[in-house]
Amino acid sequence: MSVFFTAGDVRQYAYCKRIIYFRYVLRARVKPTVKMERGREEHLKLELRRSGGGRYFSLYLLSERLGLAGVVDYLSYEDGEVVPFEVKFGRWERTYSGHYLQLVAHALLLEDHFGVEVKRGVVEYPDGGVSRMMKITEKAKLRVMEILSRIRKMVSEEEVPPPTRNAAKCEGCEMRLICRRC
Ligand code: SF4
C-alpha cells in the first residue's frame, strides 16, 4: 500500500521533526490545541465568506507519483494561471518558512494534477491583514521533495529525531506531553 504524507507534514517537519515521528511511528493521537481548533473554525468561516470569481475552496489533492496529499485552502484560476492561497491565523511578523513550504507542497500537487506550472502563490495572515505573494521557486520545490524523502526515511527506519533546538516552539506544540516522556 502506498504511504502518503501531507503538505501539513512538510510544515510540521520544518517546525520540529519529532512531531512527525510521534504521529507516524508512535501513532500518537492528541487532542487538538486551542490554536488548531481556532484554525479549523476560521477556515470554515473563510469558506463561507468568500465566493465566486474563479476561486475554489478546500481542494483535496493526492498524487501517487509524489506520495503526497493536501488540502489547498483556496486557489484562483484566471487566464490559465493557477495560484494557491495558504491562510494562517495568529500574528506573524514575517512569512514563516513552514507556511511557505506548505504552499510549495500544494503548488507541486496542483502542477501534478493540472499539468501546469505554478509560478507563484499567496500566504495570507488575516489577523494581521497581510497577504503576501510569493514566488514558487525550483529550489523550494526541491527542498519540499527532499523533506518528503527524509520523512519517508525517518518513518521507515523508526529513528527518533532530536528535539528542536528552539525550546520556545515546545510551548504551543500538540506533542508536548508525549515528548516529555521520551
Ligand atoms: S515538544 Fe518540542 S521537541 Fe517535542 S515535538 Fe514538540 S516542538 Fe518538538
Image: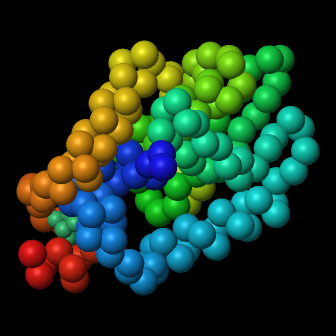
Task: Tell me if residue 129 comes above or below residue 127 in the rendering.
Answer: above
Residue drawn at the location 30% of the way across and 58% of the way down? 20
Q: Residue at x 86, y 35 (%)?
A: 54
Q: Position of residue 46 (x, y in %)?
A: 72, 60
Q: Is residue 102 visible?
A: yes
Residue at (13, 64) in percent of width and height: 167
User: Which scheme is used to colour this image of the protein?
Assistant: rainbow
- Residue 103 in sight in this render: no
Q: Quadrant of residue 151?
A: top left
Residue at 49% from the left image edge and 32% from the top image edge: 66
Ligand 1 is located in which of the four quadrants? bottom left
Image spot of residue 13 (x, y percent): 30, 50
- In this rendering, would 146 be left or right of 5? left
The answer to which of 127 and 79 lies nearer the viewer is 79
Q: Quadrant of residue 142?
A: top left
Q: Is residue 182 left or right of residue 15?
A: left
Quadrant that contains the C terminus: bottom left
Closest to the observer: 121 or 140? 140
Q: Look at the picture and state if 110 lies above or below 180.
A: above
The x, y position of residue 29, in whole percent, is 38, 78
Instruction: Give above or below for 137 relative to 42.
Output: above
Direction from residue 63 to residue 98 in the image, left or right: left
